[in-house]
């Protein structure tokens, strides 16, 4: 059912990005998956870079949505079946923004809204959305997730 929803939205899951440092992409403890920060990387190419401003808000939202799609790719690799997701618990969203920019929630909403659209009530989560001085590889956004799963 979730797979069909993703396909109906025209989303093709990429290969999950590999970690860029000394960590793993997903850690499972109990019934929780901790998904490391995902940047807008697709097929080894970083799609969105630079500082977020009021002028490129829509581009930043595309960046956040790409991060959410990478979270989905990590879930698919780890679980094999999206039906094992019982709840998207939390997202932490980081925005590489100019100091004057204050619309961080609007940027990360793109990821939150996508997960809600795909998972319905299971996709409603807690969240932070903060601005930072810079992100790895000058990425526009980075988002991590905590997901509850059933076996």
Image (cartoon, rainbow, N blue to C red):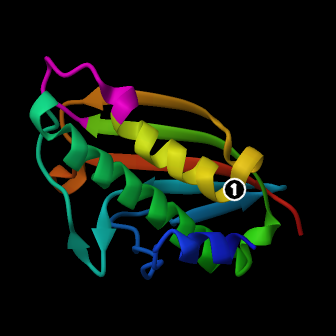
Task: Give the total number of marks visible in the rendering.
Answer: 1
Most foreground residue, 82 or 17? 82
Q: Which residues are magenta?
A: 96-106
Q: Is residue 82 magenta?
A: no
Q: Position of residue 49 (x, y in %)?
A: 15, 53
x, y percentage for residue 37?
Answer: 44, 53
Residue 82 makes an appearance in the image: yes
Q: Residue at x 33, y 57 (%)?
A: 39
- Say whether residue 130 is visible: no
**Residue appearing at x 62%, y 76% in the figure:** 76
Q: Which residue is mark 1?
A: 119
Q: Secondary structure at mark 1?
A: helix
79, above or below 113, in the image: below
In which quadrant of the rendered view does residue 7 lie?
Answer: bottom right
83 relative to 62, above or below: below
- The residue lying toward the viewer, choosing from 85 and 132, is 85
Snapshot quadrant of residue 15 = bottom left
Q: Residue at x 31, y 46 (%)?
A: 61
**Label 1: how many residues lie within 10 Å, few (<14), some (14-19) or many (20+)?**
many
**Residue at figure coordinates x 14%, y 20% from the top left:** 99
């Amino acid at each position: 059912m979730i797979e069909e929803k993703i396909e109906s939205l025209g989303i093709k899951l990429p290969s999950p990005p590999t970690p860029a440092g000394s960590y793993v992409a997903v850690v499972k403890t109990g019934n929780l998956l901790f998904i490391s920060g995902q940047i807008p990387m697709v097929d080894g190419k970083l799609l969105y870079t630079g500082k977020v401003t009021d002028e490129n808000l829509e581009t930043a939202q595309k960046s956040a949505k790409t991060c959410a799609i990478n979270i989905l790719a990590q879930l698919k690799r780890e679980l094999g079946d999206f039906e094992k997701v019982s709840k998207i618990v939390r997202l932490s969203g980081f925005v590489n923004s100019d100091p004057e920019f204050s619309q961080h929630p609007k940027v990360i909403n793109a990821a939150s809204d996508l997960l809600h659209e795909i998972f319905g009530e299971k996709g409603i989560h807690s969240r932070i959305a903060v601005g930072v001085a810079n992100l790895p590889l000058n990425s526009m956004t980075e988002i991590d997730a905590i997901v509850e799963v059933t076996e």
